[in-house]
Amino acid sequence: MPGPVLVCAGGTGGHLFPAEALAAELRARGRAVHLATDHRVETLGREFPAEGVHVVPSATISGTNPVALAQSAWRLASGFRVALRLIGQLKPAVAVGFGGYPSIPPMLAARSKGVPTILHEQNAVLGRANRFLASRVTAIAASVEALAIADGLRAKVTVTGNPVRRMVLEAAAVPYPAPTADRPIHLLIFGGSQGARFLSETVPAAIGKLDPAIRARLRIVQQCRPEDLESVRAAYAALGVNAELAPFFRDLPARIAASHLVVSRSGASTASELAVIGRPAILIPLPHALDQDQLANAKVLADAGGAWLIRQAELDAGRLAAELTRLLADPDRLTAAAAGAKSVGRPDAVTRLADLTERVAARQQQERAA
């Protein structure tokens, strides 16, 4: 592969984490990697394994306000011009996009310069940016077999899985620790930046409705928004429950591996990590997502027998307490669900995606040489 690989991704964890995994794999193969993203990389991508990180102007297109739409269009056009210069400087062999509006300018610029392009979709449905780009790219990498996509684009699709970080693969080596009656029960709760508040309000209330004998055995780890920490901490303290709370856990994969049951949203990274590690979960998809991607992700795990999908509108503290009581009393069911989740995990996803990246770049090189 004569030129570097240009990885293009929005600045959220759902986009950056699989991009980071691919970058690490390609660099291990001796390939140079550059990242095109937005300003949020300063928070999540400080250690991104790339020769260069390039911030490209972008904007989200939403709503109907003509002034806001015009401003977004101007910023995307500005990003396209910046990306054109970047493509001219780097001369990448291939560009790989992971979604988010910041991926649009560099992916379009790569296409306009004749650079082969690959889209990776983390969810079971195409996100808005990827949907816009899908007909314009060379190939599409899907995380799941059941990717919802137009029939006319299906010939472009290769199922690779969703690349996960090395710490996830390390956690996947830990066997599922089936709960026993004489040991603590480890419960993990997290919901992402958009979804943690509902869980912060509902889960402590549900724990308060459990039988005291079950409650006494609980060891809870819960992700909370900073503004919710004190209220959640006070709720668990009043119940006498052992709980560790934080806005973010850098070692979340290890905590997933240590859990008997997970209660969470069902974003792409969450669904992939639960599957690769193989842990049972109660999944509550974020209800307001425009594309209902979290619902589609949760269905994949639920259909495999690895999770229980409950819509937020159908869940309250009483329902959650009943589900926890039922599941925590049935270790065999939890163990079977752990195996079901693992059955749809793709721990080799990063290898598959790196292989596809090299194949697409090599094919383009051969066509130019012919």
Image (cartoon, rainbow, N blue to C red):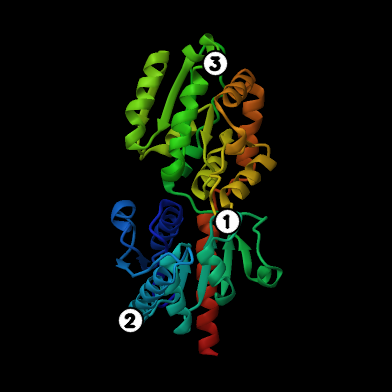
Quadrant in which the N terminus is drawn: bottom left
Q: Which residue is mark 2?
A: 85
Q: Residue furthest bottom?
A: 370
Residue 223 position in % (x across, y down): 40, 34
Q: Of the two numbered discs 3 and 1 on the same chain, state the one appearing first in sequence.
A: 3
Residue 301 relative to residue 84: left or right? right
Asked if one can make out residue 167 in the rendered structure from this viewpoint, the answer is no
Which kind of residue does numbered mark 1 sit on? Answer: Asp
Q: Amino acid at mark 3?
A: Leu
Residue visible at 62% across and 64% down in the picture: 158
Q: Are marks 3 and 1 in contact (CB under 8 Å)?
A: no
Q: Residue 74: x, y in percent?
A: 37, 76
Seen in the picture, residue 244 relative to 46 is either above or below; the reply is above
* Callout 2 amino acid: Arg
Q: Position of residue 10 (x, y in %)?
A: 41, 61
Q: Which residue, given by chain and number where applicable, does mark 3 sit on?
A: 210
The secondary element bearing badge 3 is classed as loop
Q: Is residue 148 above or below residue 91?
A: above
Sequence-first tag of 3 and 2: 2
Q: Spatial distance from mark 3 to mark 1, Cα to Cα?
A: 35 Å
Dot 1, crowdedness within 10 Å: few (<14), some or many (≥20)? few
Tally of numbered discs? 3
Query: Real-space Cα distance between discs 3 and 2?
Result: 60 Å
Q: Are the two marked residues, 3 and 2, in contact with CB atoms closer than 8 angstroms?
A: no
- Mark closest to the chain's N terminus, 2 or 1: 2
The answer to which quarter of the image holds residue 279 is: top right
Which class describes the residues within 10 Å of circle 3: few (<14), some (14-19), or many (20+)?
A: some
Q: Secondary structure at mark 1?
A: loop
Q: Which residue position is annotated with label 1?
A: 291
In the depicted view, which residue is nearer to us: 290 or 157? 290
What residue do we see at 42% from left, 16% from top? 241
- How far apart marks 2 and 1 lie (CA) works out to 33 Å
